[in-house]
């Protein structure tokens, strides 16, 4: 059996996800199994931190979940089936259980770092209370039988190779050929959507961000397969893509925080005082202008430098 993934002898670190390295002669099905196995390890490794209500652990588990869901999307034509659909539903469930903790944590950090809300103790108290409850929920989630079952089911599903073993046949594309096709197609679609970036509302821009993130994750899955000129082109493209994602991520944070702040302001007895609210809105407006400019610049660079000559 060919070795596909070069893994360290030590157990995966509970910190940020490390690079995935694939064999040059891997089949497309082998590549998926190797990628998914590594991502499963990374998700499972965050359990102790999530259990301790550590924001870093919640963030890293969410990244692992997003990468796993992106891998399923990227390899969708090879792995579609009943079990795959069930895995997708369960991964979405778990991601949803962690989302509130991350969003409320970032909102609290933003307000405190900007020194806003000094005249609204009830607002901050309610925010802190809801943040704590969200982390309690995240911690409780990794103790659930449903969570443990998901990890075990993912392991069996990956090892069983639903659909992917047939994809390793001689008549199917290699991982390199598959990667070229997938990356080029997704890059073209993203560039087309970016042509109207400045006309998009928050929700439409969020969907573009998701597409860009999936492309970035896909490049991370496959970049070890490319060297020389193709490798340099991929590296250059990903540098522009990351700048785009930084800008779109900041814009999405503003949209999420505005929605959350509005919800808390309607509920809290002592609302965020008008001056603090005005300052927060001004900060958001300035951030939007800055990040839209950065996003437009990155989008232009991506359009100038397409993948694989397309």
Image (cartoon, rainbow, N blue to C red):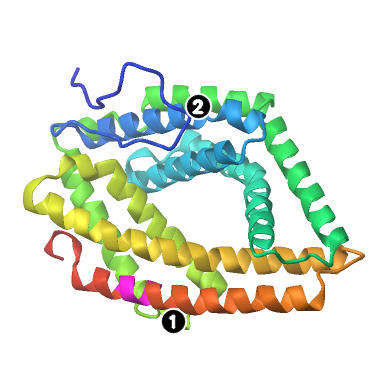
Q: Secondary structure at mark 1?
A: helix
Judge left or right: residue 43 versus residue 122: left
Q: Magenta segment, which residues?
A: 295-299
Q: Secondary structure at mark 2?
A: loop
In percent of width and height, residue 160 lies at: 39, 23
Q: Quadrant of the C terminus?
A: bottom left
Query: To which quarter of the image does residue 138 belong?
Result: top right
Residue linked to disc 2: 45
Residue 240, magenta (yes or no): no
In percent of width and height, residue 142 lies at: 65, 29
Mark number displayed over residue 87: none
First in residue order: circle 2 vs circle 1: 2
Residue linked to disc 1: 198
Looking at the picture, tell me which residue is in the foreground, 22 or 12.
12
Q: Is residue 88 visible?
A: no
Residue at 51% across, 27% down: 44
């Amino acid at each position: 059996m060919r070795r596909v993934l070069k893994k360290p002898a030590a157990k995966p670190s509970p910190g940020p996800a490390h690079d995935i390295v694939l064999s040059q002669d891997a089949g497309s099905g082998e590549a998926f199994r190797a990628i998914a196995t590594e991502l499963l390890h990374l998700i499972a490794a965050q359990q102790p931190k999530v259990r301790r209500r550590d924001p870093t652990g919640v963030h890293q588990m969410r990244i692992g979940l997003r990468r796993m869901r992106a891998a399923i999307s990227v390899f969708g034509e090879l792995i579609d089936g009943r079990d795959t659909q069930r895995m997708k539903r369960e991964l979405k469930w778990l991601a949803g259980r962690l989302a509130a903790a991350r969003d409320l944590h970032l909102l609290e950090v933003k307000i405190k770092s900007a020194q806003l809300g000094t005249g609204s103790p009830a607002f901050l108290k309610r925010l802190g209370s809801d943040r704590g409850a969200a982390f309690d929920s995240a911690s409780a989630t990794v103790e659930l039988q449903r969570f443990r079952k998901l990890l075990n089911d993912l392991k069996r599903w990956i090892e069983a190779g639903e659909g992917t073993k047939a994809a390793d046949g001689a008549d199917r594309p290699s991982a390199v050929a598959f990667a070229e096709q997938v990356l080029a197609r997704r890059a073209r679609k993203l560039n087309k959507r970016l042509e109207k970036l400045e006309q998009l509302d928050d929700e439409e821009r969020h969907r573009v961000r998701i597409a860009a993130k999936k492309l970035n994750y896909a490049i991370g899955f496959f970049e070890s397969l490319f060297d020389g000129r193709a490798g340099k082109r991929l590296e250059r493209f990903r540098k522009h893509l990351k700048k785009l994602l930084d800008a779109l991520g900041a814009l999405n944070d503003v949209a999420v925080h505005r929605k959350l702040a509005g919800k808390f302001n309607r509920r809290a007895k002592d609302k965020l005082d008008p001056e603090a609210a005005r300052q927060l809105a001004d900060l958001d407006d300035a951030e939007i202008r800055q990040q839209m400019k950065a996003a437009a610049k990155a989008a232009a660079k991506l359009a100038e430098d397409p993948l694989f000559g397309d």
